[in-house]
Image (spheres, rainbow, N blue to C red):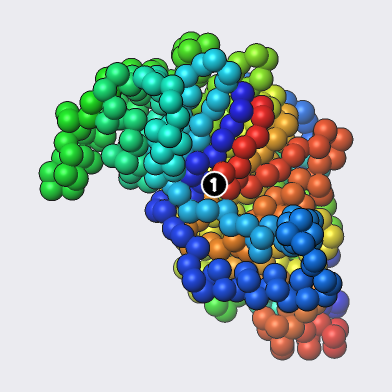
Amino acid sequence: MPFLAHPRRLFTMSRRPNIMGATEQHARARLFARAQAHPLTTAPDLGMNITDRRTGNAVVLEVTGRVDNDSAEAFRLLLVPFLRHCTADENRIVLDFSGVDYISSVGLRVLMLAAKQAKTQGGTVVVAGLHSVVKEIFEISRFNLVFQCFDSARDALAAAAPPTLAAREGA
Amino acid sequence: MRVRFWGTRGSIPVALDAAGLHAKLVEALLKASERPLRSAAEARQFIERELDFSISHTFGGASPCIEVERPGAAPLILDLGSGVRGLGARDMARADRPRTYNVIMSHMHWDHIMGFPFFAPAYVEGNHIRIFGCHAEIEHALRRQQAAPSFPVPFDRLAARIEFIGLEPGRRYDIDGIAVTGMLQAHSGESYAYRLEHGGKALIYATDSEHKLEDPRESEAFAAFFRNADMVIFDAMYSLAEAVSIREDWGHSSNVVGVELCQLAGAKHLVLFHHEPAYDDAAITRIWRDAVRLEEITRGERPPLRVSAAYDGLEMDV
């Protein structure tokens, strides 16, 4: 049995202009409510996808697309179930951002809140795979100073839980 | 409108100290040693063209005060931080008196009012000072800071005629030919942003404001207030990481949010303001360069947004 579970697509939302219109707001609220009730629901595409795979006591969340003002709330909601069980012993979260093209201040704030919650529970949230624009945004916002950033999810897993990596390599 | 920055530092005035000046001199001399400088003109040219701003200048350390100047009109002053002392000294050296001043107050925190007891024109009979603002306690705060035992000259001894005129946020007022609209901002004790419009140009003064980033409607409201502004003077005191973590609820914002809001609003020029007193010139320069770079890498199809960092003595036309 392969060590890595098959990736699951958790959420997809479409990018729409004029997100602040009243109708849009209501549509978005319904979308989020549905996502919370049924995490595997596929919704219209907002330009951001997340898939998860478990590796031992860690979970790697592969994020792709843009984590911007439109998708940040969906991103926050998606993290909720993983954060709930993120402790010192299990469900350490590695956010694989190698597929992220852009993250806004609102998206960065979601990351900060996630890290704070994990810390209070004894858990950790790290990011990995930052490149080009997103890497620069982390540096400009100084998030690189408050977040553990790894070159790849593999490096993050190795640093966080060496036995897990060994298990993965032996799979 | 000509905008002149008399004070750009937040929280408390600071000064370049001996060690800071010494470090600048060392860097400048090392750089100058690479070539002969035979005249004062060549030295000046070298300073202007080849030295980094953080070596050849200083951002200064006076607390917030900005003058908006128009030919033939009374000066419009934004906040009465320690920078207003220099403005008053300039006018005392001029012959044309009496004078009228229009002042707009963002809020009443110490750094924004502390210059008024040292604003010499307030002591001159015949001068007329009109103080506008949305904040409910402008008069109380200005009187209190001159009360014993904090200051030797009580407010009532000021010889100039001083008027207080309250404004309502969201209403458009005509102040000596400039259309002024206020907007409430998130800051301890309340602060207000102002949109100033004159001659088809719009200037935004938005300091001491925290953008919480949790409600998209808040960002949209500010973007609407900043819409198509020619210049946005913006509180960029902290890094974004600080503003959403250890300094959350401290009432200030970041260069990152400044760039994003201006992009959302279609503003033309962002001016970073209310610099952190703990930052030296090199640190403020880095924040400015970071903002310039952020604008470049996130511009997309938008027209370029000009990004500047305010310093004491900077003058720009809007």
Which residue is at the front of the view, B166 or B254?
Answer: B166
Q: Quadrant of residue B152?
A: top left
Quarter in which the N terminus of chain A is drawn: bottom right
Quarter in which the C terminus of chain A is drawn: bottom right
Horizontally, residue B154 falls left or right of residue B79, namely left
Residue at (62, 34) in percent of width and height: B232
The number of discs equals 1
Query: Mark 1 belongs to which amino acid?
Result: Asp
Residue at (66, 20) in percent of width and height: B201
Crowding near pointer 1: few (<14 within 10 Å), some, many (20+)?
many
Which residue is at the front of the view, A100 or B45?
Answer: B45
Circle 1: element type: loop
Residue at (39, 45) in percent of width and height: B82
Q: Position of residue B72 (x, y in %)?
A: 54, 15
**To which residue does mark 1 refer?**
B312
Horizontally, residue B108 falls left or right of residue B149, namely right
Outermost residue to the front: B39
Horizontally, residue A82 falls left or right of residue B187, namely right
Which residue is at the front of the view, B223 or B181?
Answer: B181
Horizontally, residue B42 falls left or right of residue B153, namely right
Outermost residue to the left: B148
